[in-house]
Image (tube, rainbow, N blue to C red):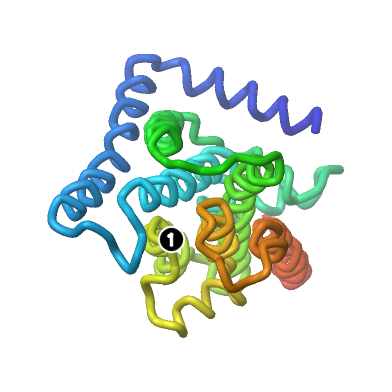
Amino acid sequence: MNLYFRYLKILFKSQLQYRASFLLICFGQFFIPFFVFAGIYFMFQRFDSIAGWQFFEIVLCFSIIHMAFSTSECFVRGFDLFSGLIINGEFDRILVRPRGTVIQVIGSKFEFTRIGRFLQSIAVFIWALFNLSIKWTIAKGITLFLMIISGIFVFSGIFILAATLCFWTIQGLEVVNIFTDGGREMSQYPLGIYKKWVKKFFTFVIPFGCVNYYPLMYLLDKNHHSNNTIYMLSPIFGILFIIPCLLVWKMGVRHYKSTGS
């Protein structure tokens, strides 16, 4: 962890060398999810609810997924840009260093400008909580916290899987954006509004449903005919998603062929 924080400090200082540019990008990042949120707001000006979900319930779902995505983009950006390390032969240098490949790839790039997107999501998150009548308990507070952590792990896992493909394809594949950007756009709404096969896929294959849909059902007391414990603990399955992703990464590293440089 000491090495990780050293990477953080070095890259943060380097990005602050051009402070005006840094602040302007942060400002721009603040408005990217804002315009998506505006679309939700105007949609609810026309419709009272979507499949039984009210405006502030959707807003809470939206804010949680965007907080998780912006955090992952900030701290796991190295995997998102991993194809550059393969193309330039930089991964050979990583392999000969006496540290794990995961920590070195993560430390190769941090995108601190995503703080703008994160702050916008925080503001929307607080607004939603103040306008929802949630009967709070300690268990619900823990579940809400785990939802955000779970989202970070799921998005990070997808970035790792996308990076692993580069061991065979060299260049990153745009199709992976279906599960990163596409997954973010889809999961900002509760999975219950989609068809059953979509709901099953994003529960048992890529567990976005464990990030927001099932725990939200528990928080908002919508699961009248289901086991509360399963819904409450569902974010843990999202966190565990990182384990198979890391195993696939290790398999990819074993199959990597050096450039010889």
Q: Is residue 196 above or below residue 156?
A: below
> Picture coordinates of residue 50 (x, y %)?
29, 64
Q: Tag 1's secondary structure? A: helix
Q: Is residue 205 above or below residue 253?
A: below
Q: In percent of the image, x 60 and y 50: which residue is there?
A: 147
* Farthest residue, direction left: 46
Q: Is residue 31 above or below residue 212?
A: above
> Picture coordinates of residue 225 (x, y %)?
58, 73
Q: Is residue 144 visible?
A: yes
Residue density around tag 1, few if under 14, some if 14–19, many if 20 or more, within 10 Å: many
* Farthest residue, direction right: 98
Task: Give the quadrant of residue 5.
Answer: top right
Of 127 and 78, the residue lying toward us: 127
> Picture coordinates of residue 77 (x, y %)?
54, 45
Q: Is residue 259 left or right of residue 166?
A: right
Q: Is residue 113 visible?
A: no
* Amino acid bearing label 1: Ser
How many numbered callouts?
1
Of 235 and 35, the residue lying toward us: 235
Of 36 and 70, the residue lying toward us: 36
- The quadrant of the image that shows the N terminus is top right
> Picture coordinates of residue 235 (x, y %)?
65, 57
Q: Is residue 3 left or right of residue 41?
A: right
Residue indicated by mark 1: 187
* Farthest residue, direction bottom: 197
Task: Give the quadrant of residue 163.
Answer: bottom right
Q: In percent of the image, x 13 and y 56: which residue is there?
A: 46
Of 79 and 158, the residue lying toward us: 158
Q: In percent of the image, x 26 and y 48: which residue is there?
A: 36
Task: Give the quadrant of residue 195.
Answer: bottom left
Q: Is residue 84 above or below residue 107?
A: below
